[in-house]
Amino acid sequence: MRRFFSLTIMLLAPAMMAVVCCGLRLPTPSAPQRVVVKGLLDDIVNDVMIVTPYVTLTPTLTPTLSGNSQGASVAGGANNGDGGNGGQDDNGNPIAGSKPTVNPLPTATASTVPSPTPLPTATPLPTATPLPTATLLPTATPIPPTPIPPTPDNSSNNDDNNGGANDPTPTAKATATAKATATKSPTPTFTPTALPEVFFAQSTYSVGEAEGDGVITVSLDRVSGEPVTVSYTTTNITAFAPNDYLSTNGNLTFPSGTLTQTFTVPVVDDNVDDPDIEEVGLKLSNPKNATLGTDTAVLEIIDDDPLPLVAFESPNYDIDEADTPQLTITLDRPSGKNVSFTYGPTSGGTAVTPDDYLVIFNVQPLAPDSTGVGPISTTVTWDGVVDDTDCEFPDPKTLILDLSSLINLDPGDPITTTITIFDDEPC
């Protein structure tokens, strides 16, 4: 048996070596190397199992020698291929009989080697949390970054001890603190000081005609650090210069720190019956170191003169019957107003109507001129005397005329006049 197994190994070793070497692309071993087949096969098989999947061939050789011998069988006996009786018994003697028949070797069965179990996927280390963004300091001085010591690199030791399989993930280095951006100082913007406003303190000023001057106050809305000047002037509205006031113009100066200044408008105290209120226009212009506010106003002159007295210039007029009376009516003072009166016959004379006169009333208006002053006298005619051809008796006759329906006038003296009519026909 021992020889049988030795023979089997000797026969199969080259084939196994050839198979392995062909799979690994190794050169076929020589005869002397067969003594180390077993060790070499173990090493190669181990390497093949680690490197790549393989098929394990498990040959089972059971050669059966059959012949006309006495039933002896040799496991692993070799046939020399010459057709002779090369068999021997356990004692080394040739076996008599027919040539032994070698049964074919069974087909090698391939066993699938299980795939190597994959290594578990390495669990990723947690991602390093980034440091919060540095808050900019409210100062113009930049802050140097905080130095951070380097993290020691232990990867070489880990590679040596663990083969690099469990290398730790490098620790994230702290982000350098951001430098504070220097705050740019704002460029100073020059804001000019608002100019004060110059204006009339009142919209209307008043003065009595007999008081002399109208005082006009002009104001600033704030104190100025520089002198302020403004021009002023007067204009006619219903008052007229020079009859009612004297034209005025000039400049007002406000010294630094003052708020008001005044100028005056001279008023004429006349004897004209002006309108109860006459108006003078006031105007500001050309401000310096100031702006204009309310630049117009009115000065009211309050008249204190009485109404004019109206009267006939003469209390008596003598006329011939064929003549037309010419009558003069006077006012004791001029008027700045529109005035009127009516003249006509009244009772009390010896003349009778319609034989001696007609009842006729005439209206006479009087108006002021462009200077605002009206006339103080006027001459009117009255056409009411009848010129007939009869011899009148008694002769002469009288007719009385009066003034009535007075407007802006008071009655004077005489308010009536007597007209004496002489007959011009012979008797």
Image (cartoon, helix red, strand yellow):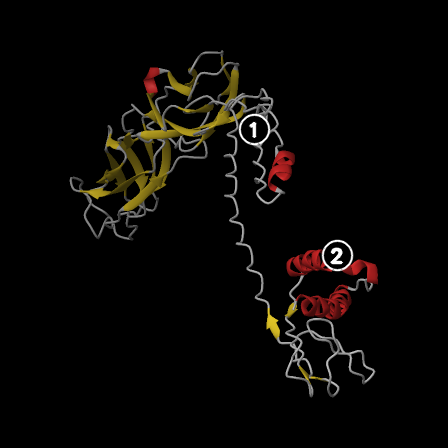
Secondary structure of the residue carrying numbered label 2? helix
Mark 2–mark 1 Cα distance, whole angstroms, equals: 70 Å
The residue positioned 29% from the left and 32% from the top of the image is: 312
Q: In the depicted view, which residue is nearer to us: 143 or 332?
A: 143
Residue 159, horizontal then vertical, whole percent? 63, 39
Relative to 116, is 176 above or below? Answer: above
Q: Locate residue 269 relative to residue 415 in the image: left or right.
A: right
Q: Nearer the viewer, residue 25 or 292?
A: 25
Sequence order check, earlier mark of 2 and 1: 2
Residue 76, quarter of the rendered image: bottom right
Residue position for label 2: 36
Height in image: 24 above or below 318? below
Quarter of the figure with residue 239: top left
Front one among 163 and 73: 73
Residue for point 63% across, 36% down: 155
Residue 242 visible within the image: no
Across and down, in percent, residue 196 comes to 47, 22
Residue type at numbered disc 2:
Val
Element marked by disc 1:
loop
Q: Pointer 1: what residue?
A: 177
Tell me the kind of residue under disc 1: Thr
Residue 171 percent location from the top left of the image: 56, 36
Say whether residue 108 is visible.
yes
For the N terminus, the image quarter is bottom right
Report the number of discs. Answer: 2
Side of 272 relative to 183 (left or right): left
